[in-house]
Every structure is written in C-alpha cells, then in structure tokens.
Image (spheres, rainbow, N blue to C red):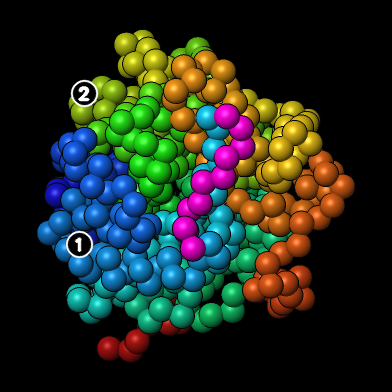
Amino acid sequence: MRYVSTRGEAEPRDFAGVLMAGLAEDGGLFVPEAWPLIAADQWRTMRGLDYPTLAARLIAPFAAPSIDEPTLLGLARDAYAGFGHPAVAPLVQIDRNLFALELFHGPTLAFKDMAMQLLGRLFDHVLGESGARVTIVGATSGDTGSAAIAALCDRTCVDVAILHPQGRTSEVQRRQMTTVLASNISNIAVTGNFDDCQDLVKAMFADAPFRRELNLSAVNSINWARVAAQIPYYAYAALALGAPDREVAFAVPTGNFGNVLAAWAVRRMGLPVRALAIGANVNDILARFLAANDMSIRAVTPSLSPSMDIGVSSNFERLLFELLGRDAGRVRQIMTGFRTTGRMAVPDAAWREASALFSGVTLDDEAVIAAIRELHARTGYVAEPHSAIGIAAGEHLRATLPPEVAVVAAATAHPAKFPDAMERALGFRPPLPAALADLYEREERYVTADNDLGAIEALVRAHALRNAVPA
C-alpha cells in the first residue's frame, strides 16, 4: 500500500513512512493510493473473530508490505490485553435497533486508547527496526493527549510533547496528562483553544528545518495510522449485528472528523453502512456544513463536551479529496482559500454527495444535560456529554431509517472523566476506576506558554535535546 497527499505535492510513502511523517510536507494529509475492497464472503469469515485478530486482519492491507499480519496480530494482542472489558469494544443495547459501542475501556477511559495503544507499539516496531528516534508533537482537546502519553511514556526512542488549551479540558483530562512524570513526556498548556494548539502543531511540521532537526512525527488523527487503527471497531460492531447481510448506520460525536472518517472508511471497504450521523455541540462547523454548505470558522465556545470544542475539522480534508474525485489541485486551492478567508468553498455537487450520506445533530449544553437525564431515566444508561451527543445522533438516525437497519452510537468516554457535568445532570459523580482512584492526589508537571510558535518550538526543542543520546 502506498499513500499520497491530499494536496498532491508530497512524495508518496509506504505505511511506515506515513506513520513516521504524520503530516505531509505540502500541508496535506496522507490517504491510501487505493482503498482495499473486501467482498461480502470475506466479511462473513470475520464474524466471531476476537478484537485483536479482527484489527490485525483489517489493518494488514493498509500496513503491507511495511508490517505483515502476524506482526500486527502480536502488536494488537499486546495493545488490547490491558483493556477493562474482555470484548475490548462491547456493544450495549440502548433501545430497539439502537446500540452504544463502548470505546472507553482502555487505560485513559476514552476512545483514543483504541488507536493509541496500538500506535505506540507500531512506533516501537518501526523505530526498533530503523534505530531512529522521533519527537512526537500533538494537540489535544482533552483525550488524545492522555491516550498518547499512556501509550508512549518511558519508550526509549520517542520524545512526546503534548499541547493542550489551558483551562479548557476537564480536570480529570488534564491530570491524566500532567501526572505522568516520565522523562520523555512534556505537557505544554497553551493560552488559547484547541484550534490554536492544532495550528501550532501544523506550523511546526511546516517549519522544514525544525521538522528535520527533531525528526517530528504526530499522534493526532492527521496521522493516517490513527485513522487506520480506528477502522476495526466499526467493522467489529457491524459484523456483530449481522453485516454484511444487514445494513448498519453509525452516529459519532466528533469535532476533528477523524473518528467518523473511520466509520466512512468501513463503508468504502465494502460493509453496508446506510448512513452516518455527526453529533456536534455548539461548535458545530460540521453540522452547519451538512445542513447548508456552510463550512466557516467561528470562535470556539467552551462547553460541557470539551473534546469537541474544535472550530476546524482537519480530517474533513481527507473526505473532501474523495468528494472531488481525488483532485489534489482543487483540494489545495480550496484549503488555501479556507485559511485565507475562513470559509471553505466546497462545490455544491460535493456538498450534496456528502449530505446524502452524512447528517448532523447539534446539542447545546442544556440539551446535553437534558439528554443525559432522559436517557438515564428511560434506560438506566449513564452517558457522559460526548456519548450523550452521539446517542442523540443515533436516535435521530433511528427515527429516519427503516427498522431493519441497526444503529450504532459511539460512546467515546467514561462518565468519570466529566464529574462536574455528571453531577449537574444526575446528581452524582461517577467514581474513577481503581487504577485512577488517587488521580487528584498525584503530582502534576507541565509548563504554560503563550500561543507563539517560536516559544513553543523552543520548549519542544529543549525537551527533545535533553533526552537525546550524545553522539
């Protein structure tokens, strides 16, 4: 499998090269040169596979020839061995034809663990073969950072610098990052919002001398390997519910579009996915686009679902590339205009194609609280704000689709990660699991910085060079 940039000006790479590069040199995102298509009879043979085996089977076409399937299977078994549920990603029935896909049983209690635990082992494997060292920079709106840190702390060939927006994560999210005191981990609290952090990461990759000096790589979903590692759980759910002989639909709370893009990829690979719903909070750029072709940047508003407090959905560029017939020149032109004007000029034909498959559902904070209460009163299910938005989007799909279609809503975080919101909605604070019971007593370590590229690069450089092995 080879990978090309959505903007067409970066050299194609294999899977290992994409894993290490993260963002393409032309500012675009890597995508498969051709999508693997799996026939219905092949899908049927995958029913009943345990999660690590299915993950290895589905990632193998994307990783070949860099990493073979037996190696992937070993990495996947190790990655998911410590998850808190034997199914890894269990399905819980919420209502007739409505299921929650629980993606929060990993070490940091969020769906990012599903990809990140495997990604950490992929980095180890590739770096172990090459003898190289990388500096990973990442931006987080709350969950990516802690998942990356949990997966990469104490690894000898990797330095990690995570940027989070100061004061805009939950306390649990922040502490899950800042209480990991491993020498290869650096946390930087940036004055600003997630988009500022994401822009700083992209700017570091665009700074070619800095990128080369520190051998930068990425763990955000701008890294294709992250998306590839998210594809299996959608297939796992679909197969459990009867696919390919039964249609399914997915509802996904999303801000950066990476998680729902993985659901779209399962459809592109041959599973019968009837529809996709995007759950949004007040930062609703994707919902506005789907409703009225309005992909315009607005100020980010803090909410009870901070992992979705994102104003620019970076992974949409990958879908745009497909909607435009893989015309990299047009993507490059549109993305340049988007950054200049703050509005993405998506052609009407492409918008109509997207809105025929995707729909958007928006809930503000009051609606989220009401949704949590109503769901708990009706079913006993306890959903935190992001998952509640996803389930509400699932309810929307269920009301619009034939009854034989199974609707799966992504439950993306454990309720204990958002105790203030849960107390407001249900009157109690869900306890943290035993492994995190002392989180509030642990020492924190992080630095604060202004939204300034030079200052951030200086911090990242000092961190990486401190850990470098002298020549």
The CA distance from mark 1 to mark 2 is 31 Å
Amino acid type indicated by mark 1 = Glu
Q: Nearer the viewer, residue 401 or 158?
A: 401
| Residue most extreme to the bottom | 470
Amino acid type indicated by mark 2 = Gly
**Circle 1 residues within 10 Å: few <14, some 14–19, many ≥20:** some
**Circle 2 residues within 10 Å: few <14, some 14–19, many ≥20:** few
| Residue most extreme to the right | 427
Q: Quadrant of residue 276?
A: top left
| Residue plotted at (32% across, 11% down) | 349
Q: In this rendering, is residue 170 above or below 175?
A: above
Which quarter of the image is occupied by the C terminus? bottom left
Q: In this rendering, is residue 333 above or below 118?
A: above
Q: Quadrant of residue 338?
A: top left
Q: Is residue 350 left or right of residue 429?
A: left
Q: Nearer the viewer, residue 227 or 82?
A: 82
Q: Is residue 8 left or right of residue 395?
A: left
Q: Earlier in the sequence, mark 1 or mark 2?
A: 1
Q: Which residues are magenta?
A: 86-96
Residue 407, image x and y in percent?
49, 30
Residue 218, image x and y in percent?
38, 58
**Is residue 291 shown in magenta?**
no
Q: Nearer the viewer, mark 1 or mark 2?
A: 1
**Is residue 95 shown in magenta?**
yes
The residue where tag 1 is placed is: 69
The residue where tag 2 is placed is: 325
Residue 39, image x and y in percent?
18, 36
Q: Nearer the viewer, residue 358 or 160?
A: 358
| Residue plotted at (27% across, 65% down) | 73
| Helix, strand or loop at mark 1 | helix
Q: In this rendering, is residue 113 above or below 4?
A: below
| Residue plotted at (65% across, 74% down) | 435
